[in-house]
Amino acid sequence: MAKASKVSPQPKTRRMRGFEPAFGLMQRDVRTVSETRGFAVTRLLTHWAEIVGADLAAITKPLKVGYNREGMGATLTLLTRAATAPQVQMQLPILQEKVNAVYGYKAIARITLTQTAPTGFSEGQVEFTVAPTAKVPPPDPVILAQAIHVTQGVQNDKLRSALEEMAKNILSRTKKL
C-alpha cells in the first residue's frame, strides 16, 4: 500500500541552520508596524525641504532608510557633495531632531552621509536644488469680505488677522461628499 503524500498549499520558507537571531524571526513584523505608525520613507522624500529647511535641503538628499538588526530605530542615509559634507556632519544632531519631530518618536537613531562629486555620477546628475513652492492665488474678494465681517468684533490685531486667515481657509475650501 502506497503512502499518500501531503501537498502543502504554501511553500515553506527556508530557515537558517543552527541558531537564528531572535530579531530575524520578527523583522518583517517590526517593519510593518513601523510603517503603520507613520514611518514611511516616501514622507522623507516628498517633504524633505519642509522637514529640514531649504538651506539643508539644497545640499542634502535622502537616499534610503535602513533598519537595524536590533529593530530599535532606523538609519537614514543622506547624499551630499564632498565640499558640503563637513557642514552637514556638524548639523547631523539637528537633522535627526527635525526628522524625529515629524514622526513624533525616535524613528531615526542614526544618520550616515554618502558623498558624491559635484557633477554627479556618470549616468546622471544629482539634483540638489529645492523645488519651487507653488504660487498661492489671491483669495476671492467675496470670501475675503466675509472673513473680515466675521472677525470685526475682535479687538486684538494679531488674533483678528489669525482668525481672518482661518476664516478664509474654511470658506475657500471645497466641500467633499
Image (cartoon, rainbow, N blue to C red):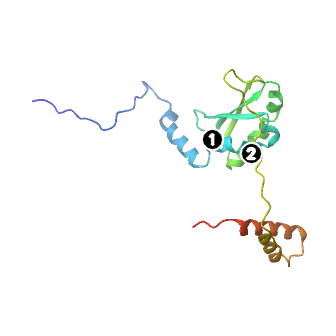
The x, y position of residue 29, in whole percent, is 50, 42
Q: Is residue 79 left or right of residue 39?
A: right
What residue is drawn where x is 61% and y is 44%? 40
Q: Secondary structure at mark 1?
A: helix
Q: Is residue 96 left or right of residue 28?
A: right
Quadrant of res 159: bottom right
Q: Secondary structure at mark 2?
A: helix
Of the image marks 1 and 2, the number of the one nearer the N terminus: 1
User: Where 46 sits versus 121, above or below?
Assistant: below
User: Farthest residue toward the top?
Assistant: 122
Where, quadrant-wise, is the C terminus in this rendering?
bottom right
Query: In the image, which disc is placed on residue 51?
Result: 2
Quadrant of res 83: top right
What residue is drawn where x is 80% and y is 66%? 165
Q: Which of the pair 115/3 is nearer the observer?
A: 115
Name which residue type carries label 1: Val
Name which residue type carries label 2: Ile
For the residues labelled 1 and 2, the Cα–Cα distance comes to 13 Å
The x, y position of residue 155, in whole percent, is 89, 75
Q: Which residue is mark 1?
A: 41
Q: Which of the pair 110/42 is nearer the observer?
A: 42
